[in-house]
Image (spheres, rainbow, N blue to C red):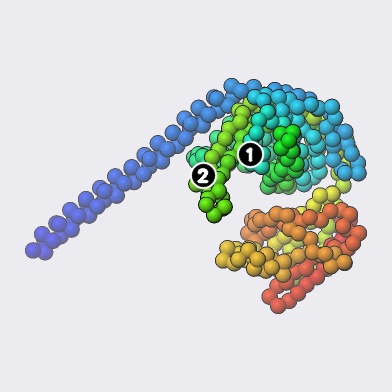
Amino acid sequence: MEKKKMKLWKKFLIVFAVIVAILIVAGISYRIYIKITDEIEINRRYDEFEKIQAVETKGTLTYIEDGNYSKVEGMDYVTQDGIGVKVDTIMLNDDTLSVSMNFKLDKEINYETLSYGYAIYDENNNIYQVSSRQHIGNLERMDYDSISMLRELGAYNKNDIHSVQLSDSSGIGSENINKEDKTVVSKITIDARDKFPLSQKLYIKIFDLGYFTIDKDADGKYDPSTTKNVDLSNSKWLFEFDIPQEMNKRETINLKLANEIPGLEIKSMTLTDTKLVINFVSEEYVNLISAGKDMSTEEFKNKRNESLSITDAEGKVYQELSGGTREENTYKMVLNVNKTDLAKKLYINYKAGEEQYKSELIKDE
């Protein structure tokens, strides 16, 4: 009887092992199939993308010293598919690039949701950023447009499409919408991962214009299920600019703490015409960021301000524009402080446990 049970148990183990082996092989085969399918689709999309040639335009930049930006002179709309595109202004320093794009439409659209893909790079093919338009309302497996543009620029790394880009974060926002004239002025803002190079030329390529619509339900609330993507044009626009010498005469100020603070290690602190960027090590602050997922938005904001903030001698608390964790216990914080604020005396306020610390930010000569 015992022998029969042993034989049955062995048979069961053999069958179980075969099933597991089949499942493993099936899983591997499926992943290989998906990978091959993705490669085929990537190549197909790129073949279509590559066929579209950009209309090229060269613009002239005039540096405006008071505003620390450059104005584009004498540029009219470059029109394709009934859409006119031009560049209005460019601002560039060590940590920020911002570009005001101007669009003129030949028909009524949802101007508030107008968006586009863009690539910004220099004469040495330093890729400031490549960003695609989100086709809201459509589900796609991959960011095909960014992949295609990076391939077009010869800068595609299939293991990490962001690794070749100089940007750390970015955003697009409408500065002005004139429905009567059917124009939209849109501002691209890109933050540097480390420091933007001293480029001599800047190229801005615009592609894949479109927008999305969304309806409201009976209660007047937006219904996400009604979201629809609308493609406007698959044309490409390429703008070339010579960077004025004044834009490369950058005066980034390096700062340090007047008095060291226990538990807070400042790795770098830079101040420009646009922002203050602090890279620091603090286990306590990074733990707070991790715990934020369990807090309400208001509580999380208050806890962060209580833990670390930048103020001046007049008591003003400066707003954090963006931030995020980096390597272990390291955080990068970007604040709306500029060089003119240094005259007001800037302070960092840091709380560790029940201990409160304050130190002035001074020039690191």
Residue at the farthest bottom position: 354
For residue 293, what is the image quadrant? bottom right
Q: Mark 2 near mark 1, Cβ–Cβ under 8 Å?
A: no
Percent of width and height locating residue 241: 80, 29
Q: Check disc 1 and report its element: helix, strand or loop.
A: loop
Circle 2: residue type: Thr
Q: Nearer the viewer, residue 353 or 59?
A: 59
Say the numbered circle drawn on residue 226: 2
Q: Is residue 156 visible?
A: no
Percent of width and height locating residue 269: 79, 56
In this rendering, would 343 be left or right of 243? right
Q: Is residue 255 visible?
A: yes
Q: Which residue is mark 1?
A: 110
Q: What's the residue at 88%, 36% (across, down)? A: 63
Q: What's the residue at 55%, 25% (across, down)? A: 48
Say the numbered circle drawn on residue 179: none
For residue 158, what is the image quadrant? top right
User: Is the C terminus in the top left, top right, bottom left or bottom right quadrant?
Assistant: bottom right
Percent of width and height locating residue 5: 13, 61
Q: Check disc 2 and report its element: helix, strand or loop.
A: helix
Q: What's the residue at 36%, 44% (across, down)? A: 27
